Image (spheres, rainbow, N blue to C red):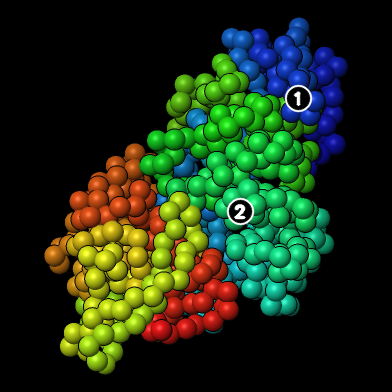
């Protein structure tokens, strides 16, 4: 919120009583309120836009926009920072040159690992990075109480406290089981957000009909789990805005916006989010700019696509007084692009500071001192030995549930299979793409190991594993045999978190993620190089998924239909209950 003194400075600058800090001259200003474009000179004072056409004003500094289009910085409306595998300062070089100046982050990952202290650790350097980090306050830590083991918890009191933080802008995503189950604690969290005039974000995966209507009655404002146009329309009709998602494994944009353009649907209540996107995919495709350009290619008028990435989001989150347009009083977050038909940010400004040029940061990445304890969160009781992954059974054959992966989505289907039993243990069948899936409790609390089966990874040998496993973030591993699964889990404990791949008893690749077992403090280039190498090894072992380590991070999620696996066992998501791995 601007103080009276700050507003006086802005007013005096516009009235030419004192010089502006910066003029961005010779630009075509995209007005996201009117949809019009006009020549202008952006006047900036104290990091804020004060005049959209300040030609002739005096300023301490000028910047020649060389005829580029000037538009507001792009906003990621829902993202899990932790899922980028990078700490916030190292993430800057991946997103800011692409024009993303605001990340609306729900860091439930680190909260599930370490509670409120984990959040504080993650946000230690938030004021030092060259973009805005605003907080969608984690509403469900743990996500599935009684169905999973986590390292931290955030109850109603903690959520109320965090909602009062200056950088808090909403209550983070709340899944259906909490609302339809009439859970007082969670409805109280929604009420706490509303009392502060903040919205509550939704997570309505798989809901339809009366259940979706009932969910909307719970006070949720939006949903980022729409997988197609029909999902989107159903939510819009109920007043739920749609956060169109395009992550590493969740590809929803084409199915939603392609049909929306065919139907002539207004985009007023659409906005963009990545939710979860690995750095190698950001490097290859881009970030929110990729979504804007893809929307334009599908027929969305360029200014409307820009509005989806800026004003729509700012208005939805009730922060249009700060963000989302190049109008007086808003942060001077500016993208310059030579074209509107295909937007390429050639220059980026944040708070009036020139932070990126020609695809590179123009300032050094800050060195942030994180607490040492956050690098020591993996404490295995079981999971280092092959026998820890045995699923015991009698007879010659067992009928088991199988989690069937859905391409380009995080939802899955329940399947069944008959698998052989040898020496009292259910076996995998790589020839039929039937691998074992296990979740190993990693907080040293109980030593649980949940086991079931999965189809869709395609591996003919070996195993992969990750300590990034939504939302509990225990160690999840999928493999053709128990020994390689154990080798992966042991490697992750040794790294204090990370990704691992093994075959024939040997670890073939590892990516350390010691910050909470979720993120690396290494530069983005190092993380991307290792991630690409490990993905290549996965493909050499027969794997077929484009982003296997993102896929495996979601397969243990007990709130996305139909099945999930936690350290406590197999979860029927719709019933919100543990079920046997045998059927």
Please state, as top left, top right, bottom left or bottom right, where the N terminus lies in the image.
Answer: top right
Number of other residues with Cα within 10 Å of mark 1, as a class: few under 14, some 14 to 19, many 20 or more: few
What percent of the width, then of the height, locates residue 280?
38, 42
Q: CA distance from mark 1 to mark 2?
A: 27 Å
Helix, strand or loop at mark 2: loop
Name the residue beneath numbered marker 2: 226
Q: Nearer the viewer, mark 1 or mark 2?
A: 2
What percent of the width, then of the height, locates residue 470?
48, 64
Q: Residue at x 63, y 18 (%)?
A: 69
Placement of 203 over or under 306, stated as above or below:
below
What percent of the width, then of the height, locates residue 171?
69, 59
What percent of the width, then of the height, locates residue 421?
22, 84
Front-most of residues 570 and 106: 570
Please state, as top left, top right, bottom left or bottom right, where the C terminus lies in the image.
Answer: bottom left
Please tell me the numbered disc located at residue 35: 1
The numbered mark, 1 or 2, whose residue comes first in the sequence reads: 1
Front-most of residues 523 and 81: 81
Q: Residue at x 65, y 36 (%)?
A: 262
Which residue extends farthest top? 56
């Amino acid at each position: 919120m601007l103080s009276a003194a700050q507003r006086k400075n802005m007013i005096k600058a516009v009235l030419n009583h004192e010089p502006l800090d910066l003029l961005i001259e010779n630009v075509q200003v995209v007005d996201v309120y009117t949809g019009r474009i006009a020549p202008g000179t952006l006047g900036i004072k104290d990091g804020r836009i004060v005049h959209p056409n300040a030609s002739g004003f005096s300023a301490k500094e000028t910047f020649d926009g060389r005829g580029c289009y000037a538009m507001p910085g792009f906003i990621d409306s829902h993202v899990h920072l932790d899922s980028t595998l990078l700490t916030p300062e190292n993430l800057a070089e991946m997103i800011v040159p692409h024009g993303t100046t605001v990340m609306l982050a729900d860091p439930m990952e680190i909260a599930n690992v370490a509670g409120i202290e984990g959040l504080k650790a993650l946000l230690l350097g938030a004021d030092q990075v060259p973009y805005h980090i605003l907080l969608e306050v984690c509403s469900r830590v743990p996500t599935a109480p009684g169905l999973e083991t986590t390292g931290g918890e955030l109850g109603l009191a903690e959520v109320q406290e965090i909602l009062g933080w200056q950088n808090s802008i909403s209550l983070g995503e709340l899944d259906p089981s909490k609302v339809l189950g009439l859970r007082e604690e969670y409805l109280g969290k929604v009420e706490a957000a509303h009392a502060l005039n903040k919205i509550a974000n939704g997570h309505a995966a798989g809901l339809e009909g009366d259940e979706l209507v009932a969910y909307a009655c719970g006070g949720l404002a939006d949903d980022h789990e729409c997988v197609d146009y029909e999902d989107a329309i159903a939510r819009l009709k109920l007043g739920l805005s749609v956060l169109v998602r395009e992550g590493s494994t969740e590809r929803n944009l084409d199915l939603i916006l392609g049909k929306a353009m065919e139907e002539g649907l207004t985009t007023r209540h659409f906005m963009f989010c990545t939710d979860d996107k690995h750095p190698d995919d950001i490097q290859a495709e881009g970030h929110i700019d990729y979504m804007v350009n893809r929307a334009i290619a599908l027929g969305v008028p360029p200014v409307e696509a820009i509005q989806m990435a800026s004003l729509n989001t700012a208005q939805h989150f009730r922060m249009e007084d700060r963000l989302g347009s190049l109008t007086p009083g808003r942060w001077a977050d500016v993208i310059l692009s030579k074209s509107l038909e295909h937007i390429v940010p050639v220059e980026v400004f944040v708070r009036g500071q020139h932070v990126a040029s020609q695809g590179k940061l123009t300032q050094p990445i800050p060195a942030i001192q994180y607490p040492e304890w956050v690098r020591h969160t993996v404490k295995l009781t079981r999971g280092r030995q092959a026998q820890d992954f045995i699923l015991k059974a009698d007879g010659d054959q067992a009928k088991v549930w199988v989690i069937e992966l859905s391409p380009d989505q995080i939802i899955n289907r329940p399947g069944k299979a008959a698998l052989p039993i040898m020496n009292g243990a259910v076996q995998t069948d790589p020839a039929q793409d039937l691998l074992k899936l296990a979740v190993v409790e990693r907080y040293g609390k109980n030593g649980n190991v949940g086991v079931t089966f999965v189809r869709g990874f395609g591996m003919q040998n070996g195993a992969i594993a990750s300590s990034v496993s939504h939302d509990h973030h225990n160690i999840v591993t999928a493999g053709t045999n128990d020994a390689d699964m154990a080798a992966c889990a042991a490697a992750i404990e040794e790294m204090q978190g990370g990704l691992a791949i093994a075959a024939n008893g040997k670890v073939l690749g590892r990516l350390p993620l010691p910050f909470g077992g979720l993120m690396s403090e290494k530069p983005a280039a190092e993380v991307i190089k290792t991630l690409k190498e490990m993905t290549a090894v996965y493909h050499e072992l027969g794997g077929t998924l484009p982003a296997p380590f993102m896929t495996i991070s979601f397969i243990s999620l007990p709130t996305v239909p139909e099945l999930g696996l936690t350290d406590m066992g197999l979860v029927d998501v719709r019933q919100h209950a543990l079920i046997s791995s045998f059927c």
